[in-house]
Image (cartoon, rainbow, N blue to C red):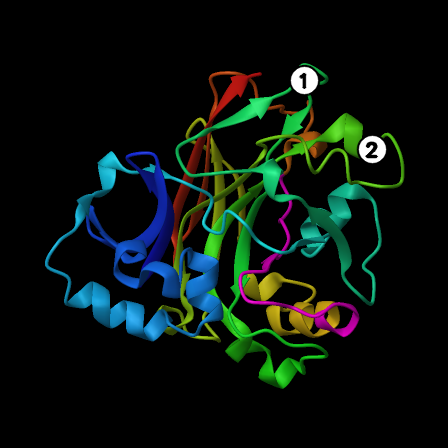
Amino acid sequence: MKLISFQYNSIDSYGAVQGERVVDLGAVFGARAPDLKALIAAGLVAEAANAAANAKVSLPLSEVKLLPVIPNPGKIICVGLNYGEHVRETGREITEKPALFLRVSDSQLAHGEDIMLPRESTRLDYEGEIAIVIGQGGRRIAEADAWKHIAGYACYNDGTIRDWQSATTQWTAGKNFWRTGGFGPWMVTRDEIADDRVMTLVTRLNGQEMQRTTTDKMIHSIPAQIAHISAFTPLHPGDVIVTGTPGGVGAKRNPPVWMKAGDVVEIDVDAIGVLRNGVRAE
């Protein structure tokens, strides 16, 4: 099942995508689950699938305004330097534990919206990634149990303002400019993607392929990420883990490639779909 968060007639809701239409699950569940995070937390995803399959009424997908998949995550934890090619192009070394940083929800935007190129910089870079949404929370989750804590998967563009990222040893500012992190177009539920499936991730800028990798090339696997992160902080339903970008980022090309106003960037994951965003000067 593909689940989205959206706005229709100025009302925020969420639903299940069926072809070119969407079943409004917010209208079905009401106060029981007022948003997608609440649906996941209440353990109602399977019930939502049944409701969507039996729904008599749906909306045209083209008429809803998409929101980031989880508009209100408690935590967005991003994994840096998680593919060998990207580690090499940055001149760094592989670490025993994953490098982590945080994003805030205000830095995210939905599929189809424009990434904002801020006045403060021209060094806006793309980072194609796969996001996982936590379904079952927990603390000190064992790697062997990690898969069952996943609600689903989405595409992510960890858009980065490179000069602000590299200005100090801390990455927070460069990773959190307003409306730079694309998250969408939907969450594909875990039951649709086998735990051992090798997914292919491709980033395109104006139709030109810039990044390509497969998930078996991750240095720290998805279960390892969940185990490590949950050791120091409890994970809750709706939390998001962004699992790392491969080599080919614009900053490390010769000459560097920066995203500019009018560009279109796509993050394409074969098991999920395509996240597409334009770029606009703020």
- Which is nearer the N-term, disc 2 or disc 1? 1
Residue 131 in the image, given as x and y percentages of width and height: 54, 55
Q: Position of residue 197 (x, y in %)?
A: 45, 71
**Residue at left offset 59%, top offset 35%:** 126
Which label belongs to residue 122? 1
Residue 148, compared with residue 159, is above or below; it is below
- Regarding residue 253, the answer to whether it shows in the image is yes
Q: Is residue 107 left or right of residue 30?
A: right
- Is 214 in the magenta? no
Cα distance in 3D space between marks 2 and 1: 14 Å
User: Which residue, as the protein is rendered here, is positioned at the far left?
Assistant: 56
Residue at x-position 74% and y-position 71%: 228
The N terminus - image quarter: bottom left
Q: Does the residue at mark 2 contact the one at mark 1 (Cβ under 8 Å)?
A: no
| Amino acid bearing label 2 | Ser
Residue nearest the observer in this picture, 104 or 165: 104
Range of residues picked out in magenta? 230-248
How many other residues sit within 10 Å of disc 1, few (<14), some (14-19) or many (≥20)?
some
Q: Secondary structure at mark 1?
A: loop
Crowding around mark 2 (Cα neighbors within 10 Å: few <14, some 14 to 19, many 20+) is few
Q: Nearer the viewer, residue 238 or 190?
A: 238
Is 269 located above or below residue 142 in the figure? above
Residue ID at (69%, 75%) = 227
Residue 199 visible? The answer is no
Give the percent coordinates (x, y) of residue 264: 45, 27
Image quadrant of residue 241? bottom right
Q: Which residue is mark 2?
A: 166
Give the quarter of the figure containing the C terminus: top right
Residue 87: x %, y % from top left: 75, 50
